[in-house]
Amino acid sequence: MKPEAWSREAERQIYNRACSTHMNARLLHILLILLSAAHVSAWSAEDQPVQAKDLKRLSIEELATIDVTSVSRRPEKLSQTPAAVSVVRQEDIHRSGVVMLADALRLADGVDVARVNGGAWAVSTRGFNIGSANKMLVLMDGRSTYSSLFGGTFWDVQDAFLEDLDRIEVIRGPGGTMWGANAVNGVVNIISKPVAETQGAALTLIGGENDRVVASGRYGARVGQGHYRVYGQYRMREAQATVAGQSAHDEIHFGQTGFRFDSNQAAAARWSLWGDIYRGTNGFSDRPDGDVAGGNVVGRWSRGSGDNQLTVQAFYDRSYRKVPQQFEETRHSGELDAQQRLVRGRHDLLFGSTIRAYRSDDLGTAGFRFEPQVRRGWNINAFGQDEVTLLPQRAYLTFGSKFGGNNFTGLEIQPNARIRYQPSARQMAWAAISHAVRLPTRFDNDIRLVNPVTGALVLTASDEFDGETVLAIEGGYRFQPHQRVSVDTAAFTNRYNDLRSQEFHLTPSPLFVLDNLLNARTRGVEIASGVQVTPFWRVRGSYAWLHKSLDFDAGSTDPTGGIFEGNDPSHLASARSYLDLPHGIAFDALVRFVSRRPSPVVPQYTELDLRAAWTVGPALELSIIGHNLLHDYHQEQASPNAPAFAFRRSLFARSVWRF
């Protein structure tokens, strides 16, 4: 049984008013024509000088020099990174008009984001996307949000003051060598701005359909040799509706506040301390509201810089979640992480260790329970990675491994090797082979599902559940055919073993047992391109194709066919347009296309988001934003044993003050 069947609300079926195939094809034709015209315009303007001061935002060439840190846990230029990685910048987040952090991931190339219900999102790359997408590791400034209950991330409680985010880095592909277990299909690292860059006050007010009220604010100032900031926000998201016009009663009320302090970042030794607390309610149609609450505190200390730097980070996280008539969980988790970078001659060496522990108290109701109710877990690992210069300015080899022990599966080894070749300053080809592991969760080891009428056990987890593994082979080519054009391509083939299966045993009584007898193969292609059409108009498009096949070990009795391990579209496409007009006017658009999900069937859809903004002065911006404008309702995800939801068009106003 899929986790959503018991962990989320039981709503009435919503009819899906997804767009027709004809309309999707027509919109994609328009999209292709737009991108083609953009390329032509860029090339025809080849001889026209472009002054950097004329660009209000980063140019295509400047974007290639952005530093990313998530691939190798050290700064490296995006154009020189031997991995499939994309960056969602603060400008992208702001100009898209997104309100929830999970929705911002729709802006990343090749990421499948599907809203499951009023408060849950399924987020994954390269397949296996479900509400409990357990093959994607999400980090908030290096703090893991991975849930030991079911795997994946509870996106309804992962939020931030969006104006203070610097960027979101998304790695498509395994990241186990650097980040440890559960980074099987990718890593999302959400990175905040340094406090010194967020001084003064900022206030954002949003009101309209769906997001009825969103109010958030931040204040930052200098204290001594360092800087601090504090923020707070509250959101009230109204209920979605059925096709008959009835409320789904899935309203959301959520409040969060937090702080951050950075010491003098120019000193030899630097430290930062930050934290958040939150509380909220999620509505249900057939029971009282659910409760969520929690908080975290994170500390980071570093010494040295560049070629010789030591960094130590620690965090503590507490979370509480209650879904009436289903389960109640209190979880405590903590981590201590240290890493050292040394550059010696041709070698760029990074090594370190991580200790992580948690205590989870899970009380199941309404037909299921956890045995034991309280579970303690730990994970200790060490890693090392070296980048060797084979040919200066041309060829580099990176290799390393993570060695980790845990109380579920014992010793796990997660190696990787990468090579990159740069024939010129504007070209880079790379290839990689990686092995990564997903560790068992409480759902895999401790769940017991019973018939509420007879009390008979119908599904059970097992202490023998092993880790899921992937062997991934991937490669890519990143280049700039013109100073105004960038192209990024990647291809991959993955082999998954020991995936979760549901084995049916008839004797001594009918019973499903969770096991590791499912395997899978995936392959795919990802393409992204950005074009600076004119100094005031920039567009970006992306496309991803995925093929997935499943097979079982001999002797498997799983009758589900593996449909609980992901419901993935074969095609994802999107295009963004940023247009700056005179007198502080901006007009932005996002078109996204998601093809049909096979089982349970979710029809393909195309949607359009628009934003019109007016910068009144240096302190005030006003905008009107529309999301999902092409249809009254559309469905994004469905689960075999859970009701489906549809999400409606929304229109709202936003004002941003900075002073």
Image: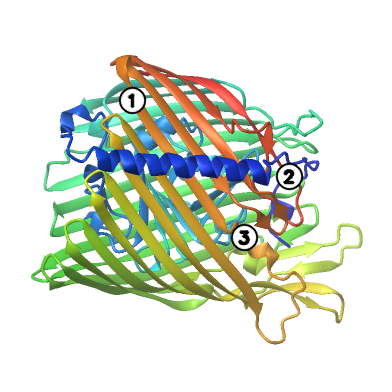
Q: Position of residue 262 (x, y in %)?
A: 24, 38
Task: Tell which of 136 and 200 is nearer to you.
Answer: 136
Task: Tell which of 151 and 382 is nearer to you.
Answer: 151
Image side of residue 644 versus residue 651, left or right = right
Secondary structure beneath label 2: loop
Give the numbered dot on residue 580.
Answer: 1
- What is the C-alpha distance between the residues marked 2 and 3? 24 Å
The figure's colour scheme reads: rainbow
Q: Quadrant of residue 239?
A: top right
Identity of the amino acid at label 2?
A: Glu
Give the numbered dot on residue 348.
Answer: none
Q: Give the residue number, with chain letter if any, for mark 3.
A: 374
Q: How crowded is mark 3: few (under 14 residues within 10 Å), some or many (20 or more)?
A: some
Q: Are marks 2 and 3 in contact (CB under 8 Å)?
A: no
**Residue 385 vertical placement versus 8 (above, below):** below
Identity of the amino acid at label 1?
A: Asp
Q: Which of marks 2 and 3 is in front?
A: 2
Secondary structure beneath label 1: strand
Q: Give the residue number, with chain letter if any, for mark 2.
A: 9
- What is the C-alpha distance between the residues marked 1 and 2? 43 Å
Question: Which residue shows up at 67% across the image and 73% down it?
Answer: 501
The mark nearer the N terminus, 2 or 3, is 2
Q: Quadrant of residue 42?
A: top left
Q: How crowded is mark 1: few (under 14 residues within 10 Å), some or many (20 or more)?
A: some
